Image: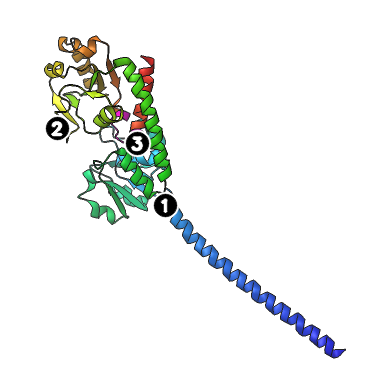
């Protein structure tokens, strides 16, 4: 009897020891899994837009917004001295970092960003000073189109599908707007001008206006537009040469200051303007500087939206 009790006691002890070992093993396994998951989550955060991104380009900022990502900091519009009007409501939680040509480096440093996006045109010579703050990605916005830039950002933040979907939606709306414009001006030629306080400018085929008018919407450039320097966004002209372009339709951007508006009023009262084919046919279309001059995914999308509304109502 005593022998049987001893055997039973030994069996119970062995069971308890084995159970304890199993628990310890499971606990170790769970801890290891938790650590791996934490590291994996950090990697995922860095690739899904959860990074603290500082954008040193208004165009890169708006490409981020198009993908649903709000940067922690962004440069502002130089002339506006603030975030661009068409996206300001989306940047309420974003720290202003000054104009792109003179960024606020102290504010940038204080943000402690995970990564900084740079526009090569403005920051290409100053990469080192940004690298002292955080890793950088440099974009050449003249290399390819806004679509290429959007795809590049989408790849960096693991939103490639969103980028492709945005581009597909844009293409679909473009076809709708093309049809609306054709209903108004047919196969007529088009030019775009900008009136400032001191100058009259005609836009070339270069960004920001050229690509959306002549590539995306497939409009026919007026006489001489293709002869303009395509490395520059515009050329200053005199009102006397306006008839030479012989445009069937004119898109007009007027700066928002009073002097520019007075200049446009004076132009409208000038016989040269009044004699233009587009003016006589009532094919002059005023458009806003923003979003039309914001060559980004979001800017172009908003410009299309405005064009759709404008040509649907006229």
Q: Compared with residue 17, is residue 151 higher up or lower down, i.e. above or below?
A: above
On whether residue 293 falls in the magenta region, the answer is yes
Verify whether residue 295 appears in magenta: yes
SS category of the residue bearing label 3: helix
Graded by Cα atoms within 10 Å as few (under 14), some (14 to 19) or many (20 or more), the crowding at tag 1 reads some
User: Would you say 219 lies left or right of 4 here?
Assistant: left
The structure residue drawn at horizontal position 20% and vertical position 32%, both measured from the top left corner, is 233
* Inter-mark Cα distance, 2 to 3: 24 Å
Residue to which mark 2 is pinned: 229
Counting from the top left corner in percent of width and height, residue 158 is at: 41, 49
Going from the N terminus, do you reach mark 1 or mark 3 first? Answer: 1
Q: CA distance from mark 1 to mark 2?
A: 40 Å
Q: How many marks?
A: 3
The residue indicated by pointer 3 is 297
Q: How are the colours assigned in the image? A: rainbow
Range of magenta residues = 291-299
Above or below residue 130? Residue 226 is above
In the drawing, does residue 70 fall left or right of residue 28?
A: left
- Mark 1 element type: helix
Q: Which residue is rendered at x = 54% and y = 63% of the image?
A: 34
User: Mark 1 and mark 3: span between their CA atoms?
Assistant: 20 Å
Q: Position of residue 75 (x, y in %)?
A: 30, 41
Image quadrant for the N terminus? bottom right
Instruction: Tell me if label 1 and label 3 are in contact, CB under 8 Å.
Output: no
Q: Is residue 128 above or below residue 198?
A: below
- Residue sitting at x 32%, y 52%: 109
Q: Residues within 10 Å of mark 3 (few under 14, many from 20)?
A: many
Kindly identify the residue that appears in the image at 30 percent across and 38 percent down: 146
Q: Which residue is mark 1?
A: 47
């Amino acid at each position: 009897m005593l022998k049987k009790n001893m055997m039973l006691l030994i069996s119970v002890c062995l069971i308890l020891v084995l159970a304890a070992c199993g628990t310890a093993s499971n606990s170790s396994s769970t801890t290891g899994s938790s650590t791996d998951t934490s590291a994996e989550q950090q990697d995922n955060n860095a690739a899904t837009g959860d990074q603290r991104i500082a954008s040193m380009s208004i165009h890169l900022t708006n490409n981020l917004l198009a993908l649903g990502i709000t940067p922690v900091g962004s440069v502002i519009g130089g002339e506006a001295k603030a975030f661009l009007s068409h996206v300001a409501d989306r940047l309420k939680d974003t720290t202003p970092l000054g104009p792109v040509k003179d960024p606020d480096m102290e504010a940038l440093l204080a943000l402690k960003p995970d990564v900084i996006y740079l526009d090569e045109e403005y920051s290409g010579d100053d990469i080192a000073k940004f690298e002292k703050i955080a890793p950088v990605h440099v974009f050449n916005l003249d290399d390819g189109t806004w679509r290429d830039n959007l795809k590049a950002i989408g790849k960096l933040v693991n939103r490639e599908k969103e980028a492709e979907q945005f581009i597909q939606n844009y293409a679909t709306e473009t076809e709708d707007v093309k049809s609306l414009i054709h209903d108004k001006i047919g196969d007529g030629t088009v030019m775009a001008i900008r009136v400032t306080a001191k100058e009259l400018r005609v836009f070339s085929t270069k960004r920001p206006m050229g690509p959306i008018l002549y590539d995306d919407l497939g409009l026919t450039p007026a006489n001489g537009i293709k002869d303009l320097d395509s490395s520059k966004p515009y050329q200053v002209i005199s009102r006397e040469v306006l008839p030479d372009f012989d445009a069937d339709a004119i898109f007009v951007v007027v700066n928002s200051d009073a002097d520019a508006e007075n200049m446009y009023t004076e132009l409208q009262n000038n016989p040269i303007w009044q004699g233009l084919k587009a003016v006589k046919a009532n094919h002059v279309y005023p458009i806003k500087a923003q979003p039309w001059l914001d060559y980004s995914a979001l800017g172009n999308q908003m410009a299309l939206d405005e064009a759709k509304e404008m040509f649907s109502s006229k």
